[in-house]
Image (cartoon, grey):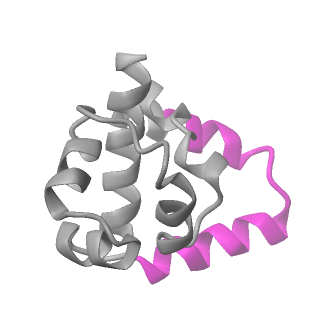
């Protein structure tokens, strides 16, 4: 259970930062103390009672909170994976990825 708490905490922190929310802001949205949110993000506690509120506040599904697949890759392996997958994509998919990457700059 400790591993899942650590992974879930990291994922919540990752999603919170992607939404440009501070711990204080997310804690206020889901109506918990900021220290409780910090304990969740550090893997000290499991947010069983607040999972739905956290997912809603971060605008993701609960299953997205448990999407840890990218944690299995380091940056170099992520780059290799992306390069290898490009050859298998449709032109429309490549255009979508191009727009996505370009918008991130």
Q: Is residue 104 above or below residue 23?
A: below
In the rendered image of this protein, does residue 21 appear above or below residue 2?
A: below
State the residue at coordinates (45%, 40%). Answer: 79
Instruction: Say which residue appears at 41% left-offset and 60% top-offset.
Output: 15
| Residue located 41% across and 76% down the image | 104
Rendering coords of residue 98 (x, y %): 60, 72
Q: Is residue 45 visible?
A: yes
* Relative to 95, 88 lies left or right: right
Name the quadrant of the N terminus: top left
| Residue 105 showing in the rendered view | no
- What is the residue that sits farthest to the left in this orientation? 35
Residue 81 magenta: yes
Report the front residue among 4 and 86.
4
Instruction: Give the main secondary structure, helix, strand or loop, of the magenta stretch.
Output: helix
Magenta stretch: residue 50 in it?
Answer: no
Q: Position of residue 76 (x, y in %)?
A: 37, 33
Start and end of the magenta stretch? Answer: 80-105
Left or right? Give the position of 20 relative to 8.
Answer: left
In this rendering, position of residue 6 left or right of residue 89: left
81 horizontally vs 49: left or right: right
Q: Quadrant of the C terminus?
A: bottom left
Using the rendered view, name the quadrant where residue 47 is placed. top left
Q: Nearer the viewer, residue 30 or 14?
A: 30
Instruction: Where is residue 100? Give x, y as percent.
Output: 56, 74
Q: How many marks?
A: 0
60 vs 7: above or below: below
Residue 21: x and y in percent read 28, 75
């Amino acid at each position: 259970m400790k591993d899942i708490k650590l992974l879930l905490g990291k994922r919540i922190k990752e999603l919170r930062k992607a939404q440009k929310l501070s711990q204080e802001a997310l804690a206020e949205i889901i109506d918990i103390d900021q220290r409780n949110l910090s304990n969740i993000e550090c893997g000290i506690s499991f947010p069983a009672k607040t999972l739905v509120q956290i997912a809603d506040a971060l605008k993701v599904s609960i299953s997205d909170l448990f999407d840890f697949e990218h944690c299995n890759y380091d940056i170099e392996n992520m780059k290799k994976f992306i390069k290898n997958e490009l050859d298998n994509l449709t032109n429309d998919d490549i255009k979508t990825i191009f727009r996505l990457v370009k918008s991130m700059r």
